[in-house]
Amino acid sequence: MKTDVAPTPWSAPQASGSVYASVHLPGSKSLSARELLLSAIGDTDSRVEGLLYARDTDLMVRALQGLGARISPWPPAGNPVEIQPIPGLWEETKQSGVSSNSGAGLEALASSDSLANHPNPPELERPVQIECGLAGTVMRFLPALVVALGVPARFTADAAANKRPLRGLLEALASLGANWESDDPLDGIFPFTINPRRGDIPEVITVDTAASSQFVSALLLSAPLWGKPLTIRCKTPVVPSLPHIQMTLEALSLRGINATGSIQSDGTWQWRVEPDSVFGQDLAIEPDLSNAGPFLAAAGIIGGVVSVPGWPAHTSQVGDLWRQILPQFGMQVRHRCGVFTARGTGVLRAVSLDCSQCGELVPTIAALAAHASGVSHLEGLSHLRGHETDRLNALYQELQKLGIRCAITPEDGLEIIGIPRTQLGARLPSDQPLMMRAYGDHRMATFAALMGLYRTIQIDDIGATTKTLPDFPQMWAQVIGAPHEST
């Protein structure tokens, strides 16, 4: 199990006036993860522009390289990335013209001449080693992939990964014939080893999605490799973050895979994937719209204008909901010619929001609510307990630390009594820095940065932002107009 060295605290820049900035964001983490994996199982090479280079995507690339894919250049350094897929996956399809992957799995891999010449081929004798860090995409997408490939693999991760939901996915994979074993089941799931499937593949599998929509995305992304139609059914009607599943369906469709979803008569969701070869593609990754949140929110809290170029007109990214959310706080927004602009006055009003489909935006929403006039009600937050940390409890603890009255409701909602900027002066403590915790969570780190705009705050681990936004400290200092403090 990985352990972390204590980082150096980071002093959050304080606002000195209205903010006016244009923020160029790196590629979407969610899209990058999906396109990397689909490129690695494609029938031809892919070329992807705008891939995010951050800890999560680096772990994904290393895992896919360990399975036989060639990915170069990496790091991309602003260049398009060429991805040569895992060798041998679609050889029988190409030879016979049949639209199925009857040769999928380790048998096809092992018989491939190209795999034999690959510098890092998977080996039958020992499991492939996959490091997950704290990346939900790696710890969920890769177990499903290795089971579909028939490759034994051993998964390791950061200590905090044992608090993230995973068992529901592993149980679904067990129904597909895989078996897994934890090194220390009393301590958690990680490290664990998962072994290839045995027996016939069922036509229908069920999965409990209440904890994470990534369970469904993991099964959908590997489904083209099974060689037969696969139906995935939810055990309950609860599916958080449905937009992420829609993103997965769209990514599959772009690669020529027939993947659809529908609501059943009992209110549960069902998805079906038809087997086919996954097209190689040339494509570009959209900017990460969720990461736009802290910068856009700064305009609302301080006052000013922040623009984000490259904002798509139509997208499955959850972050596109900023178009709807920010106006509810009283901000003005505009999307024109691919540029999204948010304008604020520093005066915010309280909101009532159902956040069940936008959990990753909640820390920024909470920061806005903490600066608004009145009581904000945020609902549908149960799944936040299984993110990089228990975000619901973390938000409660940090808001209380700042003297902001808040409460967790019995239904796992969050009520926040905001303190408008104009009332902050009389309530602030001395200039002695208040230490806020990031909990190893990139969203909590950016939440703390927002709370430091009018408070003297240090953040214990600003390095947590490297998960999706490695240059956040520099970008934040530039937007706020403060000198950058090296970390």
Image (spheres, rainbow, N blue to C red):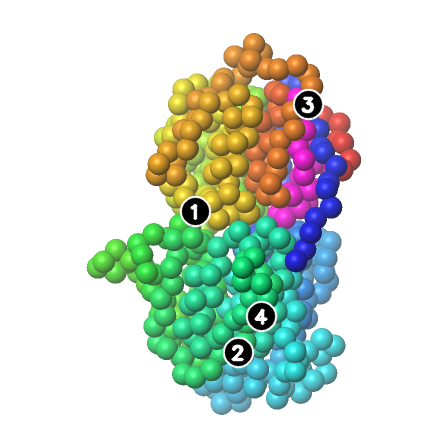
Establish if 312 lies above or below 59: above
Amino acid type, residue under disc 1 in the picture: His
Circle 2 Cα neighbour tier, 10 Å, few/some/many (<14 / 14–19 / ≥20): many
Q: Earlier in the sequence, mark 1 or mark 3?
A: 1
Q: What span is in magenta?
A: 456-481
Q: Secondary structure at mark 3?
A: loop
Give the left or right position of residue 395, taking residue 457 as reference: left
Q: Which mark is residue 433?
A: 3
Q: Earlier in the sequence, mark 2 or mark 1?
A: 2
Q: In the rendering, at what x and y percent does residue 130 appear? A: 64, 66
Q: In the rendering, at what x and y percent does residue 195 appear? A: 54, 76
Amino acid type, residue under disc 3 in the picture: Pro
Q: Are marks 3 and 2 in contact (CB under 8 Å)?
A: no
Establish if 302 lies above or below 438: above
The residue located at (66%, 51%) in the rendering is 54
Amino acid type, residue under disc 4 in the picture: Thr
Circle 3 Cα neighbour tier, 10 Å, few/some/many (<14 / 14–19 / ≥20): some
How far, Cα to Cα, is label 2 from label 4? Answer: 10 Å
Is 274 magenta? The answer is no
Q: Which mark is residue 193?
A: 4
Give the left or right position of residue 329, taking residue 19 as reference: left
Is residue 396 in view from this perspective?
Answer: yes
Q: Which mark is residue 383?
A: 1
Amino acid type, residue under disc 2 in the picture: Pro
Discs 4/3, front: 4
Circle 1 Cα neighbour tier, 10 Å, few/some/many (<14 / 14–19 / ≥20): many
Q: Which mark is residue 196?
A: 2
Is 474 magenta? The answer is yes
The residue located at (42%, 29%) in the rendering is 407
Q: Which mark is residue 356?
A: none
